[in-house]
Amino acid sequence: MSNIVEFPTNIKYKVLFNLPTGKITKINKGPEDDFDVTISNGHGEAVVPANGKRNASGIIQKCFPACEIVEVEPI
């Protein structure tokens, strides 16, 4: 019997977000941010590898500081 709890680290989350309209959008995505993102008409969708919903939305907020997170779901 062990007291160690192992949490899965290979979970991906689909994050839906909105970008502000009528403004220039700043993107801070670097090489360490290994995820695909699709942006269309001010709405974005990204599949992010993370170990929780809060971490997944934090990654998107770091890359797109002005975005509004709409939904985060595990896939």
Image (spheres, rainbow, N blue to C red):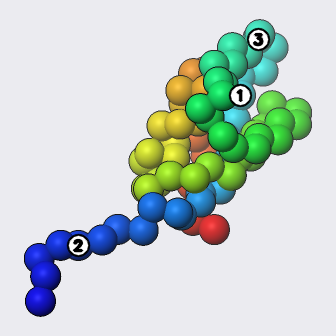
* Residue 9 at x, y percent in the picture: 45, 61
Can residue 64 be seen here? The reply is no
Q: Residue at left 43%, top 56%?
A: 52
* Residue 56 at x, y percent in the picture: 52, 47
Q: Residue at left 66%, top 40%?
A: 34
Q: Nearer the viewer, residue 47 or 34?
A: 34
Q: Can you identify the residue that label 1 sits on?
A: 19
Q: Earlier in the sequence, mark 2 or mark 3?
A: 2
Q: Residue at left 69%, top 43%?
A: 35
Q: Residue at left 63%, top 68%?
A: 75
Q: Amino acid at mark 3?
A: Lys
Quadrant in the rendering for residue 29: top right
* Residue 39 at x, y percent in the picture: 83, 36
Position above or below: 3 against 67: below
**SS label for mark 3:** loop
**SS label for mark 2:** loop
Q: Nearer the viewer, mark 2 or mark 1?
A: 2
Q: CA distance from mark 1 to mark 3?
A: 9 Å
- Which mark, residue 23? 3
Q: Quadrant of the N terminus?
A: bottom left
**SS label for mark 1:** loop
Q: Nearer the viewer, residue 10 or 28?
A: 10
Position above or below: 36 against 72: above
Left or right, 44 with reference to 11 = right
Q: Can you identify the residue that label 2 sits on?
A: 5
Crowding at dot 1, Cα within 10 Å, few <14 / some 14-19 / many 20+, comes out as many
Q: Amino acid at mark 2?
A: Val
